Amino acid sequence: MRTTLLLLILALGIGGIYLLNILNSGKKKREAYELRNAGLIYENKQLQMELGKNVAKANCMTCHGFKYKTENYLQGVVQWLGPNYLKLYLTKQDSLIKAKDSIAIILKSKFGNMANSHNFKFTDREFDALIEFMR
């Protein structure tokens, strides 16, 4: 009886250790995945920012010009307008101005009151990148 009890305690002890190792291994794998995923998110965010900067250089900076090559004076406009209105403004500025949209008129005046209108046809990916760059 004593031997059986000792064997049972030993088996439970070894099983418990084995179970703890499995749980700990799962935790380590999850932590490694989270770190790897965070790195990919950071990398993707960097690539998105770079694409946004390139879209801005090719389409925005030609008219609006930045004081310094690294400056983004449009930064903060996304928080002010929200991404949905900004997308609308960048694709249909002429329609908004004709409709006497007060925000569009203020924006046009604030950023140079140029004769041209924004009617860009960006892809969703380009819009998202541009908006991320302008945040």
Image: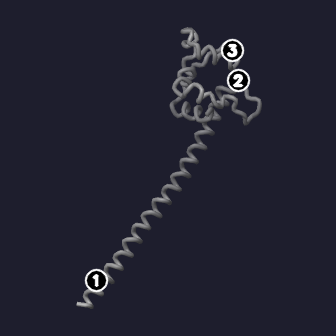
Q: Position of residue 71 (x, y in %)?
A: 72, 34
For the residue labelled by badge 3, is the local secondary structure a helix, a strand or a loop?
loop
Where residue 58 sits, quadrant-wise, is: top right
Q: Position of residue 94 (x, y in %)?
A: 58, 13
Identity, as a three-letter code, of the amino acid under mark 1: Leu
- The residue labelled by disc 2 is 64
Identity, as a three-letter code, of the amino acid under mark 2: His
For the residue labelled by badge 1, is the local secondary structure a helix, a strand or a loop?
helix
Mark toward the viewer: 3 or 2? 3
Establish if 20 lies above or below 95.
below
- Residue located at (44% from left, 67% from top): 25
Left or right: residue 55 compared with residue 35:
right
Establish if 110 lies above or below 79.
above
Identity, as a three-letter code, of the amino acid under mark 3: Asn
Q: CA distance from mark 2 to mark 1?
A: 79 Å
Mark identifier at residue 8: 1
Residue contact at pointers 3 and 2, CB within 8 angstroms:
no
